[in-house]
């Protein structure tokens, strides 16, 4: 096997103990106990520097890369708790991993996208995929992805935005011994390798198509001339006063996608994270929703979510004649975890996918504040979706 990957996971509360245990469990089964890349996803309550320092020390030869999440996904588990860390250690003779860091993403997203694309082109001859992990609270991800796509052309771009414990205060990105906020870390996959990406949302439009009539810097004030929160409340219980109201976790916005979407339900799904009660404005992270945008209100359907996620895994499986990948990364929205499925998240949304792609396939992911995945060759910033990235060894 040219590529070997293994996952370690730990839920101890002490950052040093948890990081060491997860890292050692991940790297120990690999040849010579060494790895080329160590991917790390962890909850935000840990002392982040201590966590990353001990993981890098435990896997000294590996490039360490990752971010914080609302929860971590590891093998058949979904751990949405105050303390959880998962590490995937990867060693390969056929795949090359190049890592990148952009510090100023949140301040200058367009420039950050352009610079990252230039860095990748200068360092990687034939990238098969670029995996992005960015801050989930700061930065216009839509502008960033547009600039990056303009530089990278047809290279598939996938990933997720970092999260915290639903406090919406600060998220973290990891690169070696560094811990950033407001940044982007990324790795390019190249070599004798195939990468398959699939994405789904499981939402259905409700009501008529509408128009964003007042928006600025991610805040939507009016839709069809109506305060955004007032419009949302038409689909919620009459006593709903904030985004924590019963039903809001199912309500979101769908932006129609024109052209051939290759079987994808043709809406980019977006969800509000903040409400200004005084004005009725709703804040949508990630940018891209501006005045004049045509939208539908959409509602999540748990059964459709499960069916569409399963269809994702089956599309990946069919693309390689039923062969199991060397490893899989799962980027799944924080709003599709325990908020929706409670204690059954792993059983409903992780285990069936892993069973489809191979019950022993090394599997790592996290619950994000936004997902990054291509539709019809263009990368989009999504909410309420799952994005799967399956990496396959390919015969030379």
Image (tube, grey):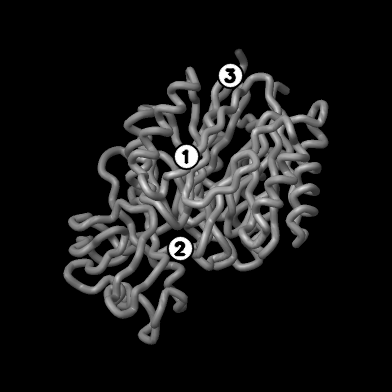
What's the distance in space between the residues labelled 1 and 3, CA to CA? 27 Å
Which of the two discs, 1 and 3, labels the residue nearer the N terminus? 1
Q: Residues within 10 Å of mark 2 (few under 14, many from 20)?
A: some
Question: Disc 1 vs disc 3: which is toward the camera?
Answer: 1
Which of the two discs, 3 and 2, labels the residue nearer the N terminus? 3
Image quadrant where residue 237 sits: bottom left
> What is the count of numbered marks?
3
Residue designated by label 3: 192
Residue designated by label 2: 301
Residue at horizontal 61 percent and vertical 59 percent from the top: 44
Which of the two discs, 1 and 2, labels the residue nearer the N terminus? 1
Image quadrant where residue 59 sits: top right
Q: Residues within 10 Å of mark 1 (few under 14, many from 20)?
A: many
What's the distance in space between the residues labelled 1 and 2, CA to CA? 37 Å
Along the viewing direction, whichever of 43 and 351 lies nearer the viewer: 43
Which image quarter holds the N terminus?
top right
- Label of residue 55 in the image: none
Q: Is residue 108 visible?
A: yes
Q: Is residue 170 left or right of residue 113?
A: right
Percent across and percent down for residue 13 are: 75, 62
């Amino acid at each position: 096997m040219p590529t070997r990957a293994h996952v370690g996971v730990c839920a101890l509360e002490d950052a040093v103990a948890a990081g060491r245990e997860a890292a050692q469990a991940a790297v120990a089964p690999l040849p010579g106990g060494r790895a080329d890349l160590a991917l790390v996803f962890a909850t935000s309550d840990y002392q982040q520097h201590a966590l990353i320092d001990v993981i890098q020390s435990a896997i000294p030869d590996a490039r360490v890369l990752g971010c914080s999440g609302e929860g971590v996904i590891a093998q058949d588990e979904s751990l949405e708790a105050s303390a959880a860390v998962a590490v995937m250690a990867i060693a390969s003779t056929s795949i090359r991993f190049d890592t990148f860091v952009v510090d100023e993403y949140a301040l200058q997203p367009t420039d950050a996208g352009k610079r990252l694309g230039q860095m990748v082109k200068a360092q990687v001859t034939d990238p098969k995929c670029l995996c992005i992990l960015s801050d989930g609270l700061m930065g216009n991800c839509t502008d960033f992805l547009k600039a990056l796509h303009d530089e990278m052309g047809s290279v598939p771009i996938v990933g997720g935005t970092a999260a915290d414990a639903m406090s919406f205060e600060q998220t973290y990105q990891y690169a070696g011994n560094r811990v950033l906020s407001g940044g982007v870390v990324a790795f390019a996959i190249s070599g004798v390798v195939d990468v398959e990406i699939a994405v789904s949302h499981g939402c259905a439009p409700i009501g008529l198509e509408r128009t964003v009539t007042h928006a600025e810097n991610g805040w939507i004030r009016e839709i069809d001339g109506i305060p955004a929160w007032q419009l949302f409340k038409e689909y919620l219980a009459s006593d709903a006063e904030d985004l924590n109201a019963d039903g809001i976790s199912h309500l979101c916005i769908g932006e129609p996608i024109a052209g051939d979407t290759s079987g994808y339900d043709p809406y980019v799904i977006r969800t509000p994270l903040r409400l200004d009660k005084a004005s009725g404005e709703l804040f949508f992270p990630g940018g891209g929703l501006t005045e004049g945008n045509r939208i539908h209100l959409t509602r999540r359907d748990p059964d459709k979510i499960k069916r569409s996620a399963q269809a994702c895994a089956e599309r990946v499986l069919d693309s390689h004649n039923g062969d199991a990948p060397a490893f899989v990364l799962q980027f799944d929205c924080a709003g599709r975890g325990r908020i929706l499925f409670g204690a059954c998240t792993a059983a409903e949304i992780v285990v069936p996918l892993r069973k489809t792609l191979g019950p022993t396939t090394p599997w790592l992911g996290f619950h994000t504040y936004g997902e990054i995945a291509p539709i019809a060759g263009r990368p989009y910033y999504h909410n309420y979706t799952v994005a799967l990235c399956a990496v396959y060894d390919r015969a030379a």
